Image: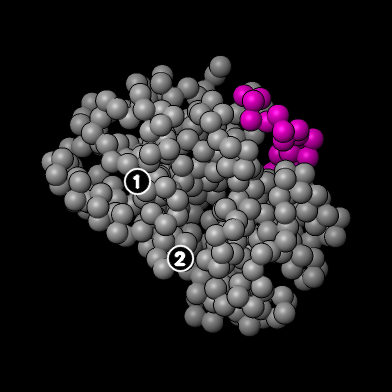
């Protein structure tokens, strides 16, 4: 099957294809150190075993500066220097931490990713954002630095639980709302219960979603304007994740998309019919649209969001299926819509 390839900033390649073949072609001829986690090691030990490796704790609780410090110390023990290449194999937490550690150790080592989750393939590993959480606030400490490559093999997604697979669907739906009405229609006609096993359709959907993100990153790598659109639904999603561990990232994004869609309707930016389609697709994909956190707690968390500027916040609002806008508004004005 033909590989799909996308390039970002002429520095980073995202390739959808078979991991064994692609790694042999893309890894440089230099010492390699792998960063992964115990779950990935259990499923794909043959990818990790040939290299010195560091296994991270599982879950968001391990996505911290303390974890990065431990990676630095292990690098020192291994004799890692600027002649080495860092390979992250795992989901979004692994790639976020790997990219941050590689970008900051000795002022920067080259790195690449093998992304093993749908959420990682469509979002976390693509675009050059790397970082860790701080006191529960998502990705509060980080940097922009592009991986040399990202390998996405949809066959690796077969080991995911249905819930873990679904969390990536929220980001694909988000991408469609932002910039691809045709992708949105494809998803509406999709049988999500069979998607994981449909390699051809999954590759096409994944390619279209990554293409949207790659195009936005290409014109705005450091989130000065256009890239803010990728935060659609995420202002409230990150607040939900700050306040509770009941929902994973995709589940929180689904709720965030629902809430921000209602706000767009209330501000006369989005037709009610389009809002209904968005909610219906999210529910068709298996998401609940109910927030488990009281709105007053979410708004308190939003006030500390990294997208805030003083008393203002940048909010992304859908204006149609396949289009959205970025609106800078006072946080008090944003809050009043939800009170």
Q: Quadrant of residue 89?
A: top left
Residue at 61 percent across and 72 percent down: it is: 298
Q: Can residue 53 be seen in this view?
A: yes
- Tell me the distance, in whole angstroms, between the alpha carbons under discs 2 and 1: 18 Å
Residue found farthest to the top:
1
Q: Which residue lies furthest to the right in this view?
A: 273
Residue 327 in sight here: no
In the image, 222 versus 41, the foreground residue is: 41
Position in image of residue 330 (x %, y %): 61, 80
Q: Residue at x 63, y 53 (%)?
A: 251
Which residues make up the magenta segment?
179-199
- Secondary structure of the residue carrying tag 1 is strand
Classify mark 2: residues with Cα within 10 Å, few (<14), some (14-19) or many (20+): some
Tell me if residue 337 is in the magenta stretch.
no
196 within the magenta span: yes
Dot 1 alpha-carbon crowd within 10 angstroms: few under 14, some 14 to 19, many 20 or more:
many
* Element marked by disc 2: loop
Q: Mark 2 points at which residue?
A: 136
Residue 119 percent across, percent down from the top left: 54, 43
Residue position for label 1: 56
134 is higher (above) or lower (below) than 90: below
**Nearer to us in this view, 119 or 7:** 119
The answer to which quarter of the image holds residue 296 is: bottom right
Q: For the stretch drawn in magenta, what is the main secondary structure?
A: helix
The C terminus lies in quadrant: bottom right
User: Where's residue 303, x and y in %?
Assistant: 54, 77
Q: Quadrant of the N terminus?
A: top right
């Amino acid at each position: 099957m033909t590989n799909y390839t996308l390039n970002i900033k002429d520095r980073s390649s995202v390739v959808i294809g078979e991991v064994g073949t692609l790694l042999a072609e893309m890894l440089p001829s230099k010492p390699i150190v792998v960063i992964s986690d115990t779950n990935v090691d259990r499923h794909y030990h043959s990818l990790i075993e040939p290299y010195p490796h560091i296994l991270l704790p599982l879950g968001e609780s391990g996505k911290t500066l303390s974890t990065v410090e431990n990676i630095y110390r292990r690098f020192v023990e291994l004799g890692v220097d600027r002649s080495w290449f860092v390979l992250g194999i795992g989901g979004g937490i692994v790639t976020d931490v790997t990219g941050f550690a590689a970008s900051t150790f000795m002022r920067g080592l080259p790195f690449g990713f093998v992304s093993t989750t749908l959420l990682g393939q469509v979002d976390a590993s693509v675009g050059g954002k790397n970082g860790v959480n701080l006191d529960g606030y998502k990705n509060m400490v980080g940097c922009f630095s592009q991986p040399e490559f990202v390998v996405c093999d949809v066959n690796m997604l077969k080991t995911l639980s249905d819930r873990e697979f679904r969390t990536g669907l929220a980001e694909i739906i988000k991408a469609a709302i932002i910039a691809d009405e045709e992708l949105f229609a494809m998803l509406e006609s999709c049988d999500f219960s069979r998607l994981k096993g449909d390699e051809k359709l999954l590759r096409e959907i994944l390619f279209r979603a990554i293409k949207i993100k790659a195009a936005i990153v290409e014109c705005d790598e450091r989130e000065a304007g256009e890239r803010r659109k990728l935060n659609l639904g995420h202002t409230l999603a990150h607040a939900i994740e700050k306040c509770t561990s009941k929902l994973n990232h995709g589940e929180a994004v689904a709720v965030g998309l629902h809430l921000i869609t209602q706000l767009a309707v209330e501000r006369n930016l989005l037709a009610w019919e389009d809002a209904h389609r968005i909610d219906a697709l999210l529910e068709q994909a298996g998401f609940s649209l109910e927030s488990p956190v009281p709105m007053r707690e979410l708004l308190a968390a939003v006030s500390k969001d990294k997208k805030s500027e003083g008393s203002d916040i940048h909010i992304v609002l859908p204006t149609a299926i396949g289009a959205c806008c970025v609106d800078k508004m006072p946080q008090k004005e944003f809050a009043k819509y939800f009170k």
